[in-house]
Amino acid sequence: MSDNRAGAAGGGAIYGLGVIGAWVYFWQQADGFWEFVWAIVQGLFWPAFMVYEAFQALGG
């Protein structure tokens, strides 16, 4: 039997690269200690922030 789990691993790798890219972007924008802490949180949850902002923009 064939075990087809390779697609899930590829998605995780792409998400990981996105998180690292988000950390770099948000880290460059931060100035103080708490902004660096917030940059780490934003890097982890950037897809949720992005979807929220998209729905907010569509809702008017």
Image (tube, rainbow, N blue to C red):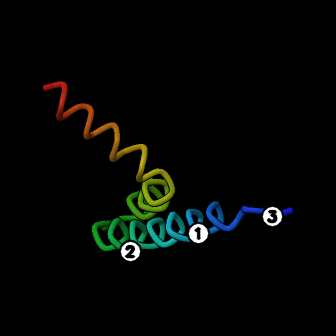
Q: Earlier in the sequence, mark 2 or mark 1?
A: 1
Q: Position of residue 35 (x, y in %)?
A: 38, 59
Secondary-structure class at tag 1? helix
Residue, disc 1: 10
Q: Are marks 2 and 1 in contact (CB under 8 Å)?
A: no
> Please, what secondary structure does the residue beneath circle 2 have?
helix
Give whichever of 57, 7 is nearer the camera. 7
Instruction: Please report the residue visible at 86 percent of the width from the left and 62 percent of the height from the top.
Output: 1
| Percent x, y of residue 16 | 54, 68
57 relative to 27, above or below: above
Mark 2 or 1: in front is 1
| First in residue order: circle 3 vs circle 1 | 3
Please state the total of marks drawn on the protein image. 3
Image-quadrant location for residue 59 = top left
Left or right of 60 on screen, residue 4: right
Establish if 48 lies above or below 13. Answer: above
Looking at this view, is 30 or 51 the one in front? 51
Q: Position of residue 45 (x, y in %)?
A: 47, 51
Question: Could you give the CA–CA distance between mark 3 and mark 1, rounded to whole angstroms?
Answer: 18 Å
> What residue is pinned by disc 3?
2
Callout 3 amino acid:
Ser
- Residue type pointed to by label 1: Gly
Mark 3 or mark 2, which is nearer to you? 3
Give percent across and percent down for residue 38: 43, 55
Q: Report how far apart the C-alphas of labels 2 and 1 lie in the structure.
A: 21 Å
Which labelled disc corresponds to residue 24? 2
